[in-house]
Amino acid sequence: LLAEDNEVNQEVTSGLLESLGCTVTVVGNGAKAVEEFGKRRYDLILMDCQMPVLDGYEATRKIRNKETTGALPWLQAGAEYTPIPIIALTANAMSGDREKCIAYGMNDYLSKPFSMDGLSKVLDTWLLKPPITENPMDRGLPSPIGEEIDFDHDKVIDQGVLNELLSYMEEDAETFLK
């Protein structure tokens, strides 16, 4: 969930998130973020701190209150719940801003403008990675083992590219080809 009031920032941030493989829901103020969070489970919230109607700080406080009181209609009774990571997005890079964000219940802080690398690191830190519980071979895909595969070898390997790679390898080329 991306809570950001600036349309340019919405477009840029959602584009970056989508290029990282995320599905993004965008809202334009803190009140909408609280409302949207109440509708369904999200993996993470990127929360702009300075927004109209309800700023990111108060929106975070309201979301944390919903989590504490169990006022989440989408959460099944008795189900285990992990609080959602909320990452502050702010143009302020002043001393004490990070501490203020943490004090309001945010988990981390990303200063605008941020890079793809900075965003990626935050996502890697806070997004839960589900454990691998299935063998990829159990997905019902046909197995090529024992089957004859028909393809044109000349189209699979570009001989010019192969020769160029082999020229870099010098004496190791023969070992590579074996």
Image (tube, grey):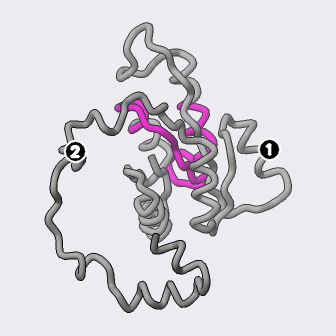
Query: What residue is shown at x 23% (from left), y 76% (from top)?
Result: 153
Q: Give the amino acid at mark 1.
A: Glu
64 vs 53, nearest the viewer:
64
Question: Whole-percent x and y of residue 95?
Answer: 85, 56
Question: In the rendered structure, does residue 53 fall within the stretch colored magenta?
Answer: yes
Question: In the rendered structure, does residue 123 fall within the stretch colored magenta?
Answer: no
Q: Is residue 122 shown above or below 64?
A: below
Residue 110 lies in quadrant? bottom right
Query: What residue is shown at x 53% (from left), y 80% (from top)?
Result: 173
Q: Give the amino acid at mark 2.
A: Ser
Question: Whole-percent x and y of residue 57?
Answer: 63, 42
Image-based side of 166 in relation to 117, left or right? left
Q: Which comes before the other along the chain, label 2 or label 1?
A: 1
3 vs 84, nearest the viewer:
84
Q: Is residue 44 shown above or below 153?
A: above
The local secondary structure at tag 1 comes to helix
**Magenta highlight range:** 36-63
Residue at label 1? 99
Image-based side of 26 in relation to 171, left or right? left
CA gap, disc 2 and disc 1: 54 Å
Q: Is residue 130 shown above or below 117?
A: above
Mark number displayed over residue 143 = 2
The local secondary structure at tag 2 comes to loop
Query: What residue is shown at x 50% (from left), y 85% (from top)?
Result: 165
